[in-house]
Image: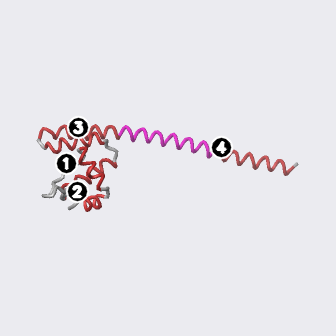
C-alpha cells in the first residue's frame, strides 16, 4: 500500500511516517520500481507497535535502539532488546510514582481550598447573623 493509505490506517501523517523511517524508528520500507514506498502488513504492524510504545511514554532513543537491534535480527540481540524494554519500564514506573505523588499533593491542596471556602462561608453567615440581630 502507498504511504497515504498506510498513514490513514495508522492515523499518522505521511510526513510522520517518512520521519520515523529517516530516524530509524521503523525499518526501511520496501520500494517499488519507481522508488515509491510500498507498505505491507508487517510495516503497518510495526508502526502500530511504535505508536503504542510512544503513547505509553517510551523514549524515541530507546525505540530507535530497539528497532536497530530488531533489524539486526540475530539471536544475540534478544537480551539487549529485552533490557531496553526493562529499562524503559523502570523509567516509566518511576515517572508513574512521581505522578502519583503529585496527584496526592494536588488532592491535599484542593481539600485545603475546600476547607477554606467552607469556613469562609460559615464565617460570612455568622457575621451576617450577628449584623441582622443587632
Q: Earlier in the sequence, mark 3 or mark 2?
A: 2
SS under mark 1: loop
Question: Mark 1 against mark 4, which lies toward the viewer?
Answer: 1
> From the viewer's perspective, is residue 115 above or below residue 47?
above
Which x, y percent locates residue 80? 19, 37
For marks 1 and 4, give the CA distance: 57 Å
Which is more foreground, mark 3 or mark 2? 2
Q: Residue at x 40, y 39 (%)?
A: 97
Q: Which comes before the other along the chain, label 3 or label 1?
A: 1
Tell me the residue at 29%/61% (across/down): 8
Residue 27 is labelled as 1
| Marks 2 and 4, how far apart at CA | 54 Å
Tell me the number on the disc at residue 44: 2
Q: Are marks 4 and 3 in contact (CB under 8 Å)?
A: no
Where, by quadrant of the figure, is residue 14 drawn?
A: bottom left
Say which residue label 4 marks: 116
- Is residue 101 found left or right of 5 in the rendered image? right
Residue 83: mark in rendering? 3
Extreme residue in the front direction: 34
Q: Which residues are magenta?
A: 93-116
Amino acid at each position: 500500500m502507498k504511504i497515504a493509505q498506510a498513514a490513514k490506517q495508522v492515523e499518522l501523517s505521511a510526513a510522520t511516517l517518512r520521519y520515523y523511517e529517516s530516524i530509524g524508528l521503523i525499518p526501511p520500507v520496501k520500494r517499488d520500481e519507481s522508488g515509491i514506498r510500498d507498505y505491507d502488513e508487517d510495516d503497518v504492524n510495526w508502526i502500530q507497535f511504535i505508536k503504542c510504545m510512544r503513547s505509553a511514554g517510551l523514549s524515541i532513543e530507546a525505540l530507535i535502539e530497539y528497532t536497530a537491534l530488531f533489524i539486526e535480527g540475530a539471536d544475540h540481540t534478544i537480551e539487549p532488546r529485552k533490557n531496553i524494554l526493562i529499562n524503559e519500564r523502570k523509567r516509566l514506573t518511576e515517572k508513574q510514582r512521581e505522578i502519583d505523588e503529585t496527584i496526592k499533593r494536588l488532592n491535599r491542596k484542593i481539600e485545603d481550598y475546600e476547607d477554606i471556602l467552607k469556613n469562609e462561608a460559615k464565617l460570612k453567615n455568622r457575621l451576617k447573623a450577628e449584623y441582622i440581630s443587632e
